[in-house]
Every structure is written in C-alpha cells, then in structure tokens.
Amino acid sequence: MNASPDSPDSPDSPGSPDAPDAPKGRGTATSDTPAAASGKAAGGGMFASLRVRNYRLFFIGQFLSNSGTWMQFVAQDWLVFDLTGSTFAVGVTTALQFLPVLLFGLFGGVVADRYPKRRILLTTQSAMGVFAALLAVLTLTDAVTVAHVYGFAFLLGLMNTFTNPAIQTFVVEMVGPERVGNAVSLGAVNFQSARLLGPAAAGPLIAVIGSGWAFAVNALSYVAVIVSLLAVRTADLLPSRPQPREKGQIRAGLRHVREHPKLLWPILLVGFVCTFGFNFPTLLSGFTYNVFHGGAKEYGWLTTAVGVGALGGALLSARRRSGRPWLLVATAAGFGALEMASSLAPRLWVFGLVLVLVGLLSVVFSTMANSLVQLATDPAMRGRVMGLYMLVYTGGTPIGGPVVGWVVEHYGARSGILACGAVATLAAAVFALALTRRGPRPATP
C-alpha cells in the first residue's frame, strides 16, 4: 500500500515464488476469494467479508475459540480472587497476561513480517490449547496455586505476542484491502459475541462445578481454530512479500509510524485510553464483591453487560466504511465520560446498564482505530506497525492493571473507575487540542 491511507495496497499475487504457502497452478478467482474483488469495489453490506470462504472458515473457528478464551478469563480472574481475596492480585494476573506484549510486542510484529501468518497461528494456537489443558488439570485436582495461574497467564500472553500481529495481518491476506475495514469490524463482532457467550456460560459453570471445567472447555475450543486454519485454501490468499532478516527492522517500523501522523495519532490515543480505561476485570471484580456484595454469578452478569454493549458497537462499526481522527477522539471522550458516570451507579442493574454503553463505545473506538491504522500502513511494514499497535492496545495493561487494582483496593471501586474514565477523557481532550493546532499532516512516501 502507498503511504496514503486512501489508496489500496497491492499484495503479491498468490502462487508467486515469494508468496508463502501458495500452491501453484491455481485457476481464476472465484466469487468467494479476495482476488475476485480486484478491479472493482468489494461487495457492500454488514457481512461483506463473510462472502470470502477463507475468512468465513476462520471466523467460525475464531468464534468458538474466543468463547472458550472468555470463559477462561472469567474463571482465571475469579479463581485468583477466590484464592487471595485481593483485587490487587487480580490486577497482577491481568498485568502478567499482557506483560509479554509490552516486552516483546515489537518483535512479534517483525516475526509476522518475516514468516507466513497461517504457520505462526497454527503454532501459537496449539501451544495455547496445551496451556489451558494443563491449567484445567491442576485446578480439577486441587493442586492449583496462585503461582500456577500467574505462570500460565504469562505464557498465554507470550503466545499472544506473536498471535495478535499475525491475526491482524492475516485478515488482510484473506479478504484483500477493499474489505479490510469490514473484516476488522466483523472480527470485533466475533470477539464481542464470544465475550457475551463466554462469561454468560462461565458464571454458572464456575458457581456449580468450579473453574477447572471452564479451563477444560477452553482447551477444547482451540481445536476449532486449528481445524479452520488447516482448511484455509492457501491459493486464495493475497500474501504480502516476506521480509528478509535484516538489522534495524524494529527501528524502521517505529520510524515509519513516527513519520506518518495518520498512524501516530491513533496509536498514541489508543495507548492512553486502553492502559487505564480497559481494565474491566479489576474494576468489575471490585464492584461485584466490595460495592454490590455479589459473587461469581454477578461478576459474570457484569462482564456480560460489557459484552452486550461491545457486540452492539461491533455491529455498528461493521456498517461504517471508515472513520476519521476527529470521530475517534469524540468516541474516546464519550467512553471516558460514561466510565466516570458509572462510578455513581446506586444499584447493580443501573451499573450494568451503563456498562452496556461503556462496552459499545469501547469497541467503536478500538475498531475505528484499528482500521485507520491498517489502511494507512505500507504492506511491507504491516506486521511491525500492528505489533506496535497491539503493544499499546494491550501492552499498557501491565502498567494500568496493578495501578488500577491498587486504587480499587485502597480507595474503592468507585474511585477506581472514576479515575480510569478521567484518564481516557483527558487523553481525548489533549489529542483534540493537538489536532486543532496541527492536524494530521499529509503522509509522505
């Protein structure tokens, strides 16, 4: 892709000598391949990307796997809280899960630029399934300790360091540049639908038979995504040219972002908002136990409320073709204001209703930022840029998680969510001022 976000990129054709995993001898593109959209606008509509066979298979596998992952998140956080009685310990778990992204996120982007994305995903998804199975065995045999949960949270995060940029760039290879905005939004629909189903199932499951079975279900769910990856027709992919191993590749990626404000502004804003505003596990566990005096069931309900709103936000985003920097800033400001308003909720059901709106704006914000960054990135740099994007999107959690957990533990859950919303709102105001004074300069080649 050219430096300008308004011009489509031109990935290497499948079957070329440099294209990874591309069998030779493929005929003309069919209606369910991204190549069929070449030379004309891709089909519109909310579910346009699902017309592509590879993306459709991947979407189904991801939904099943994501549902299991959300069950594990809820079970993991509640298990730590049950073992320790500490919201700070929950924050530490969340921090350990995202610490590898902070440490190795940029290298994960380099790996995504060097190797076939499908091969990376098959490796990481298999490893994550094994980790979930081991944690299930430890929990079901009553041998689990907080140290075990911490260790597996770190290992899960380590695999996500390589998974996240690979998934982000693999989406473009499956659907092509014409549909990338829609595919990113449908990916959010997928993730948030799983976010709705997973916690809703996890709460009663944990309450009745314990956290171990939630980990076991997650281990089985990885089979679905592995099967979907094996079923992908590699000849229908539009892979970017693998980048050779060279010195300074991480610096080159950072320089590319710094020199293109249409990449830099969204990534910086995402970093500020997500580091503090997206600490839902820590905040919701504190509200459940300390404010509303509930248990695992209530915690599952609150997590589901965020998921309901997030699903609505993802569906809303799928109807939009693109976003603009000013709309991104406005969405961040609205998200922060709603978080602050939720700190005043007098009842559990009122808090849950506000969380629906919080979840909606969180996904509208994140999907808009993701698509803006994807469309503004040169294909040769896409892995490294998305590695940086995922670093600020999730890598700030090791900083924000313990800080928010400490605030909740010492000053209460209401003060914690008020502070998180204030940070997001202030970040939006600062970047609004920056856009007013300077504006995103036109990108240069």
Image (spheres, rainbow, N blue to C red):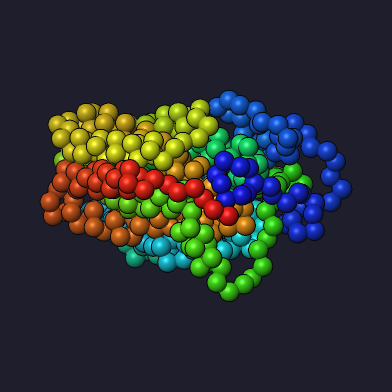
User: From what the image shows, is residue 347 above or below residue 252?
Assistant: above
Q: Which residue is drawn at 29% across and 56% down?
A: 400
**Number of numbered discs on residues:** 0
Residue at the left extreme, as displayed: 411
Q: Can residue 266 be seen in this view?
A: no
Q: Is residue 309 visible?
A: yes
Say which quarter of the image contains residue 341.
Answer: top left
User: From what the image shows, is residue 390 above or below residue 171?
Assistant: below
Residue at the bottom extreme, as displayed: 247
Residue 85, position as x, y percentages in the image: 21, 54
Residue at the top extreme, as displayed: 45
Q: Residue at x 35, y 40 (%)?
A: 329
Say which quarter of the image contains residue 384.
Answer: bottom right
User: From what the image shows, is residue 250 above or below residue 341?
Assistant: below
Question: 33 left or right of 426?
Answer: right
Residue 84, position as x, y percentages in the image: 24, 57
Q: Which residue is drawn at 49% across and 43% down?
A: 372
**444 and 276: which is toward the camera:** 444
Question: 407 left or right of 380?
Answer: left
Q: Which residue is drawn at 15% across and 35% down?
A: 344
Residue 288, position as x, y percentages in the image: 22, 41
Residue 255, position as x, y percentages in the image: 49, 63
**330 and 319: which is toward the camera:** 330
Say which quarter of the image contains residue 365.
Answer: top left
Look at the image and tell me in which quarter the C terminus lies: bottom right
